[in-house]
Image (spheres, helix red, strand yellow):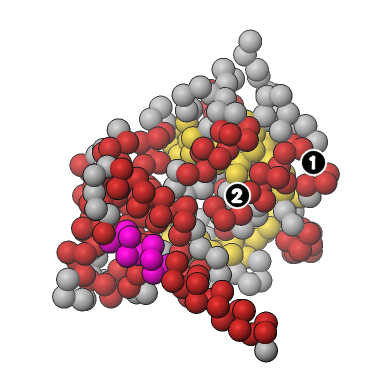
C-alpha cells in the first residue's frame, strides 16, 4: 500500500557544514512558504545552544541568511519523521546510529549523504535495506569556529535515488524531497542510477584525498612536482579499476572532468581530509582511502599508491597516539 505524506517531516542528523547547509536551505524554503516540509535538526547540546542564541547562519555565493530552526536531542526523539537525512562524518556513524534509533518509525526512510560506500553495509545491517536510500552530495564548505556555515565555492549539489530492495513508498518520498529542493538554490538530481553517481564521486574523492594527504599539498603544488601528474593519474586509475570491477565504470565525461580538476596546475584545492589531518583531528581515512584500497585490490590492481596513502594516515595516527600517551605519563 502506498504511503503519502501531507507534509514531509525530515530529521537532519547534524547541523555542521553539510547537514546544516542542505537542511537549512530546506528550512528556509519552508518558512518562506515555498515548500511544505518540516525540518528538525538532531544536534548535541553545545550546537543546540549556539543555534538557539544565534540561529542557523549560512554564508554562500547564493546569498547569506540567518534562520531560527527547530532542534532536538536524542532523548527527545519520537516516531514522527518520514525521512532521516544522515549527514555525519564516517567516524561518527556509530554514534549517529545510536542517537537516531528512537526516531525510526515503521515507515521512516534514511537518506545517507556520507562520503564513500562502506556505510551502506552498516546501515543496512542496523535498519534493513528497505529503509536505506542512496545519496551523495557535492559541497565545498566549512563550519567556522563561530558556528557559521560558509560555502567556499559555488559547489552545492545533492543526488539521491532508490536502491534495490527499498520500500514501496520510497519513490513518493524522494519525489517530495526533489520538489522541496527545487525551491532552493541547491542543485538537485533525483537519479534512477544513484549508485553510478555515488561511485563516480567516490573514485574522484578517494584519489583527491589520498594524494593531497600523502603530499600534504594542494593540487597545484603536486602538479609542480616532477612526477606529480603521473602519480595523481595513476592513483585515479587505481580507483577507476575498483569502480569498473563493481559494475559502475566511470563515464568518459566524468573521467575527463576528474582528470581536469586533479591536474589543474593553478588549483589551490585540498581535500577536507587534509584539513582534518593538519588540525590533528579525526579523519575518514579508513572509510575512504582504506576501503577503496581493498576494493582496488579485489579488482586486480596492486593499489600501490592507495596503500602508501593509507600507511601514511595510519602512521600519523600511531604517532599521535604515542605522543598522547607520553604526555599523559608525564
From the viewer's perspective, is 285 left or right of 127?
left
Q: Determine crowd level at label 1: few under 14, some 14-19, many 20+ residues with C-alpha closer than 10 A.
A: some
Query: What residue sits 67% from the left and 84% below the top?
Result: 329
From the viewer's perspective, is 65 left or right of 45?
left
Badge 2 or badge 1: first in the primary sequence: 1
Query: What residue sits 51% from the left and 63% below the top?
Result: 283
**Quadrant of the frame with the C terminus:** bottom right
**Mark number displayed over residue 301:** none
Instruction: Identify the magenta region.
Output: 305-313
SS label for mark 1: loop
Q: Please tell me whether mark 2 or mark 1 is closer to you in this view.
A: 2
Report which quarter residue 194 is drawn in: top left
Image spot of residue 192 (x, y percent) = 41, 27
Q: Eyeballing the image, is 205 above or below 246?
A: below
Residue pointed to by mark 2: 93
SS label for mark 2: helix
Image spot of residue 98 (x, y percent) = 70, 45
Can residue 309 be found in the magenta stretch? yes
From the viewer's perspective, is 301 left or right of 272?
left
**Mark number displayed over residue 77:** 1
Q: Eyeballing the image, is 173 above or below 234?
A: above
Q: Does any portion of residue 86 appear in the rendered image?
A: yes
Which sits in the foreground, 167 or 305? 305
Image spot of residue 162 (x, y percent) = 48, 27
Can residue 210 be found in the magenta stretch? no
Query: What residue sits 45% from the left and 43% below the top?
Result: 117
Q: Does any portion of residue 32 appear in the rendered image?
A: no
Task: Kindly give the residue lying farthest to the right in the view shown.
Answer: 76
Which sits in the foreground, 146 or 78? 78
Amino acid at each position: 500500500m502506498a504511503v503519502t505524506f501531507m507534509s514531509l517531516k525530515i530529521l537532519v542528523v547534524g547541523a555542521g557544514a553539510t547537514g546544516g547547509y542542505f537542511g537549512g536551505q530546506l528550512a528556509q524554503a519552508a518558512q518562506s512558504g515555498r515548500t511544505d516540509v518540516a525540518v528538525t535538526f538532531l544536534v548535541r547540546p553545545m550546537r543546540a545552544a549556539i543555534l538557539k542564541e544565534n540561529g542557523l547562519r549560512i554564508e554562500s555565493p547564493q546569498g547569506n541568511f540567518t534562520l531560527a530552526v527547530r532542534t532536538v536531542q536524542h532523548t527527545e526523539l519520537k516516531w514522527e519523521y518520514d525521512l532521516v537525512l544522515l549527514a555525519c562524518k564516517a567516524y561518527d556513524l556509530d554514534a549517529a546510529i545510536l542517537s537516531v534509533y528512537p526516531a525510526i518509525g515503521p515507515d521512516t526512510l534514511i537518506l545517507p549523504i556520507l562520503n564513500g560506500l562502506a556505510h551502506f553495509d552498516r546501515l543496512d545491517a542496523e535498519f534493513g535495506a528497505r529503509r536505506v536510500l542512496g545519496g551523495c552530495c557535492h559541497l565545498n564548505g566549512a563550519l567556522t569556529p563561530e558556528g557559521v556555515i560558509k560555502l567556499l565555492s559555488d559547489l552545492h549539489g545533492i543526488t539521491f535515488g532508490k536502491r534495490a530492495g527499498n520500500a514501496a513508498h520510497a519513490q513518493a518520498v524522494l519525489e517530495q524531497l526533489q520538489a522541496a529542493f527545487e525551491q532552493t538554490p541547491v542543485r538537485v538530481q533525483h537519479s534512477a542510477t544513484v549508485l553510478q553517481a555515488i561511485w563516480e564521486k567516490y573514485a574522484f574523492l578517494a584519489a583527491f584525498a589520498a594524494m593531497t594527504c600523502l603530499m600534504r599539498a594542494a593540487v597545484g603544488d603536486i602538479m609542480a612536482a616532477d612526477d606529480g601528474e603521473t602519480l595523481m593519474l595513476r592513483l585515479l586509475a587505481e580507483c577507476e579499476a575498483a569502480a569498473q570491477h563493481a559494475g559502475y565504470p566511470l563515464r568518459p565525461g566524468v573521467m575527463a572532468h576528474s582528470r581536469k580538476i586533479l591536474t589543474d596546475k593553478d588549483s589551490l584545492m585540498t581535500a577536507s581530509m587534509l584539513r582534518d589531518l593538519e588540525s590533528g583531528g579525526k579523519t575518514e581515512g579508513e572509510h575512504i582511502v582504506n576501503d577503496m584500497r581493498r576494493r582496488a585490490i579485489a579488482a586486480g590492481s596492486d593499489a600501490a599508491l592507495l596503500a602508501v596513502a593509507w600507511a601514511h594516515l595510519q602512521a600519523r595516527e600511531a604517532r599521535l597516539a604515542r605522543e598522547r600517551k607520553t604526555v599523559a605519563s608525564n
